[in-house]
Image: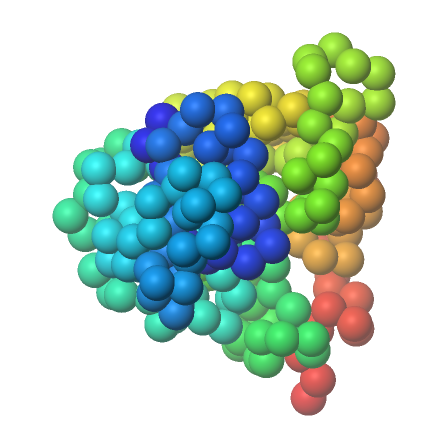
Amino acid sequence: MRIGIIGAGRIGGTLARRLSALGHRIRIANSRGPQSLTDLARETGAIPVTVADAPRDADLVIVTIPEKNIPHLPVDLFSGTDGNLVVVDTGNYYPQQRDGRIAEIEDGLPESRWVEKQLRHAVIKAFNTIYAQHLLEMGKPPGTPGRIALPIAGDDTKAKSVVMKLVDELGFDPIDAGGLDESWRQQPGTPVYGQDDDAEGVRRALTQASPQRQPEWRARR
């Protein structure tokens, strides 16, 4: 696939490495510009581009930047793209640690629903529950006992199936976590977050999640 990645931090850089190794054609962008991505490009074969160019001719775009930076992306980022473009949101809201207060999320809007509103394009929530190092190193073949599973939430079943196939390629069991309004079940502080559970464990953790945010995952007043 032709994949654009917006964000070259831990998750973005890891996905560039893993997906390039699987034979996907990667274009990667960050806020500092293509010239800052020379080393990653040399390592992976990914093509450094501007943020505005990342979605161009792509089959799938991964947005993997801090929540606080989402509103600063170009407002027309996806305006000229194919209607079938799959957009993946890997983000997490860290109000105390990084992002500050985002009122709509504090009021109960699922994080990825908020991202979708900012991007003006439907998103699939994925890759937000696993540590970057584990994403890099802990993928296993299908059927391996204890294979780590990753929840994927979204409203478009076709787009979600594309992402689920990609997750499987990367060495993890994809678990359908429902529509985007259910994506709060995989947000920080929920039982599935950061736990490296297998498929059964992920399904169980999703059912045990509470929509009530714990104090450490809420903005300070």
> Is residue 112 found left or right of 93 in the rendered image?
left
Q: Which residue is farthest top?
A: 143
| Vertical relation: 142 (above or below) 23 | above
Residue 210 appears at what percent x and percent y? 76, 52
Residue nearest the viewer, comparing 157 with 210: 157
| Vertical relation: 206 (above or below) 209 | above
Quarter of the C terminus within the rendering: bottom right
Q: Quadrant of residue 123?
A: top left
Residue nearest the viewer, comparing 38 with 160: 38
Residue in the picture at 29% in, 53% down: 49
Residue 82 appears at what percent x and percent y? 20, 37
Residue in the picture at 41% in, 38% down: 45
Residue in the picture at 51% in, 66% down: 67
Quarter of the N terminus within the rendering: top left
> Is residue 4 found left or right of 126 in the rendered image?
left
| Vertical relation: 122 (above or below) 38 | above
| Vertical relation: 190 (above or below) 203 | below
Q: Quadrant of residue 135?
A: top right
Does the image show residue 123?
no
Residue 212 appears at what percent x and percent y? 74, 61
Render colour scheme: rainbow
Residue in the picture at 41% in, 55% down: 38
Question: How many numbered markers are drawn?
Answer: 0
Q: Quadrant of residue 69?
A: bottom left
Residue 134 appears at what percent x and percent y? 73, 41
Q: Which residue is farthest bottom?
A: 221
Does the image show residue 80?
yes
> Is residue 98 found left or right of 1 in the rendered image?
right
